[in-house]
Amino acid sequence: MPHTLGPHVLVSYGGDEMRLAEIIELRPVPAAGLLATLTRRCPLSCAHCSTSSGPRGEDTPAEPLRRFVGGFTSEDRPEVLMLTGGEPLLRPALVADLAALAEVAGTRTSVLSGMFFAADGRVPTRIMRALRHVAHFSASIDVFHEREVPRASVFRAMHHIGESGIDVSFHVTGTLADDAYLADITSSIRTEFKDQAAVLVNHIRPVGRAAGWASARTVPLRNTVAEGPSPRLTAPCAMAAWPTVAFDGTVTACCNQRVVDARPVPGHLRLGHVADDDWAAIRRRCQESPVLRAIRTAGVGSCTDCRSLTRRPEALDAARRSGSRPAAGAMDVLGARLQRDAGAATLLRRYGSERYAPLVLLGGPGNGEVPG
């Protein structure tokens, strides 16, 4: 049965918030967002962790990252700054600083947390202080997280955060599409939060700590992000749109974990480094790279195909020629606009769980149309 806190709970969140659907709709738009990993450290030890985070992971250099975000201006900035890890709230002062710097320029910040701090349902003062300039907060929850932080405690803490004026959502991970856990947890969230907290559902992938056990038990990625060779399944890729700051400060054009962790990063997917480049330079490279334009508008096959382009000079040259055509820039802009206009649920049918994609719309306009 879904856990509830009782009839005394009133779910009515407000403030300068940002709905999860807004963030997802921006995902195909080149440089509309910046995804920054703050640390590979995490006090939890979830068996499916895509980043293989743990107690001794490395921290992203703080001062270069502060300077980088401090370089946002009202005329040249991402719409959203997403902070993740590892566990970003192991560095609460850095979260607070980055969100405040981003806010000055008009960029809104979203934080994704594993909720390590919420075992008793409370939100420590240091965490609430870190979130004071944050517009959106999302909690990761799945069968592995629940072994370490109880569902009831996560829900109680999320109510506290939401009541402070921050929009809240959940990132849920499961195995097969008909996973009984996914049905239970999504129902529980909807009941507890009265359909005011959006839910993004993904399936476990064979990366990080799940690499050795997940491949045979999970839903294969759809054509747009398949990992194996797929010469006949080429499609546009929205994941090459947002720069991603990796754990060492390197900025990649893709959030695929194998790209984030690869050293050297494939040349066509490396945008720079926060210690050497400012946002304007990273944005320009992201938006104007002919190869990235080709990947976003036409695709180059699977993720494996894309990562290996530097080892296939003819394919790389073909992508560069395609993205250098006179109409390539306009096609890139149009493709992003069409994907944004199609909405968050449509994008998640490609990149997340097709069955649960509409749950990303919870709490926003058209909420009553979300299926049960």
Image (spheres, rainbow, N blue to C red):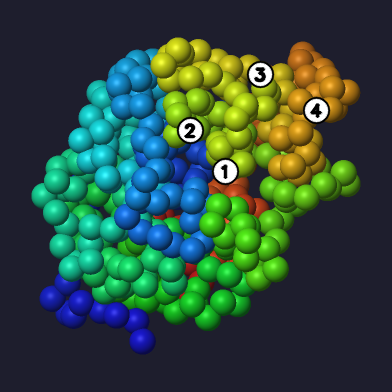
Task: Give residue 289's mark.
Answer: 3
The quadrant of the picture occupied by the N terminus is bottom left
In percent of width and height, residue 317 lies at 83, 20
Q: Which residue is mark 4?
A: 311
Res. 239 image quadrant:
top right
Type of residue at label 1? Gln
Name the residue at 48% across, 33% down.
246
Question: Residue at left 30%, top 72%?
Answer: 150
The residue at the far front in this view is: 56
Q: Are marks 3 and 2 in contact (CB under 8 Å)?
A: no
Badge 3 element: loop
CA separation, marks 1 and 3? Answer: 21 Å
Say whether marks 3 and 4 touch (CB < 8 Å): no
The tag earlier along the polypeptide, 3 or 2, is 2
Q: CA distance from mark 1 to mark 4?
A: 19 Å
Figure quadrant of residue 253? top right
Identify residue type, mark 4. Arg
Asked whether disc 2 touches disc 4, contact meaning CB atoms under 8 Å apart, the reply is no
Task: Indicate the position of residue 332 as horizontal and vertical percent values.
Answer: 67, 27
Q: In the image shown, does 101 or 55 lie closer to the viewer? A: 55
Name the residue: 44% across, 62% down.
46
Which of the pair 112/93 is nearer the observer?
93
Asked which secondary structure carries label 4, the reply is helix
Which amino acid lies under the numbered mark 2 shown in the image of this protein? Ala
Label annotation for residue 246: 2
Q: Separation of disc 1 and disc 2 at Cα?
A: 9 Å
